[in-house]
Every structure is written in C-alpha cells, then in structure tokens.
Amino acid sequence: IVYKATVKQTNNQQTNTYIGQTSTDFKKRLGVHKHSFVNPSVNQTSLSKHVLELKSQRIEHEISWELVDMGKSFSPVTGVCQLCIKEAFYILFKPEMAQLNSRDEIFSACRHKKSALLVKVNSKKRKSPGS
C-alpha cells in the first residue's frame, strides 16, 4: 500500500503531506507511526519529526490518512519492487503530495528485497567445530 498522511494545523489551517508505503497491512504501519509520534528515540521518519516539532511548539494538529496506490513488494522473478517505485514516483512527480518527504528517500535501497530472497540471514556467527 502507498498512503498519504495529511497534517493539518488547527490554529492556521496550514497543511503538510507525507507519502509512505508498507508491505504489511496498514494498521500495523499506522501503529508504528503513532508510536514514533510519542517516542523520539524510535525509528523516526520525516512525518514523525514534523509531528514532534508541532508538539514541542504546542501546536494543535490533526492527521488524516488515505490510500493512494497499491503494488506488489519485491519479486525475485522480476527484480522489481512496485511499492518502492510507486513511492518514489509520488515523491518525485507529485511533490504536493510529499511535502514532508526528504528527496534522498528515493535513493535508498528496497527494504523488501532481503525478505523476498531465499537467503537466510544469520545474525550470530557460529564457530566451526574444533576451533
């Protein structure tokens, strides 16, 4: 899912928008966003940084969410991640929908690739027997 968050300040009606994507269900991603709005040490996005800045200035705001697009995550057959491509498209070609996004997000590696490949990532190195 590619989604848009609109942050509207209640005092002056100023709005800012953010484009994001998730390969899990939106409810889980929304929970992570909400957690980052109250905990500055957790996975910060440009959206959560903006919300925390508004909170620090005691500016009342509302956040509305909407579905923008859908696509499949990384496929090892095609080597393409539609989610990452669509998110980059909206950031580049629809900047009014991605005011809060940083432009360097489009250059980051696909987050979905590792989980789609048949390579098991070992977090602990094992010593060979006899060493």
Image: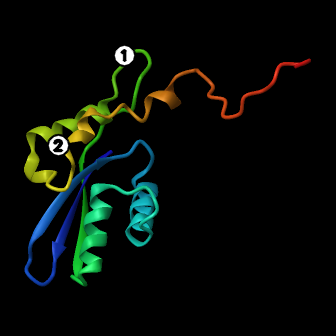
Give the mark nearest the N terminus, 1 or 2: 1
Task: Inspect the image, locate mark 2, and give the three-letter code of the amino acid beneath it.
Answer: Ile
Which residue is painted at 22% across and 82% down in the image?
Answer: 60
From this viewpoint, is residue 87 visible? no
Quarter of the picture holding the N terminus: top left
Q: Position of residue 80 (x, y in %)?
A: 33, 22
From this viewpoint, is residue 119 visible? yes
Q: Is residue 86 above or below residue 43?
A: above
Residue 63: which disc?
none
Residue 78: which disc?
1
Q: Is residue 94 above or below residue 52?
A: above
Q: Position of residue 119 (x, y in %)?
A: 59, 21
Residue 74 in the figure: left or right of residue 100: right
Label 2 secondary element: helix
Residue in the foreground of this view, choosing between 30 and 39: 39
Which residue is painted at 9% across and 77% down in the image?
Answer: 13
> Distance of mark 1 from mark 2, alpha carbons?
23 Å
Between circles 1 and 2, the one closer to the viewer is 2
Label 1 secondary element: loop
When asked about the image quadrant of residue 72, the answer is top left
Give the residue at mark 2.
91
Residue 97 in the figure: left or right of residue 83: left
Residue in the foreground of this view, choosing between 127 and 42: 127
Q: Is residue 12 above or below residue 23?
A: below
| Crowding at mark 1 (Cα within 10 Å: few <14, some 14-19, many 20+) | few
Outermost residue, front direction?
131
Q: Position of residue 79 (x, y in %)?
A: 37, 18
Task: Inspect the image, locate mark 1, and give the three-letter code of the amino acid beneath it.
Answer: Thr
Residue 39 in the figure: left or right of residue 92: right
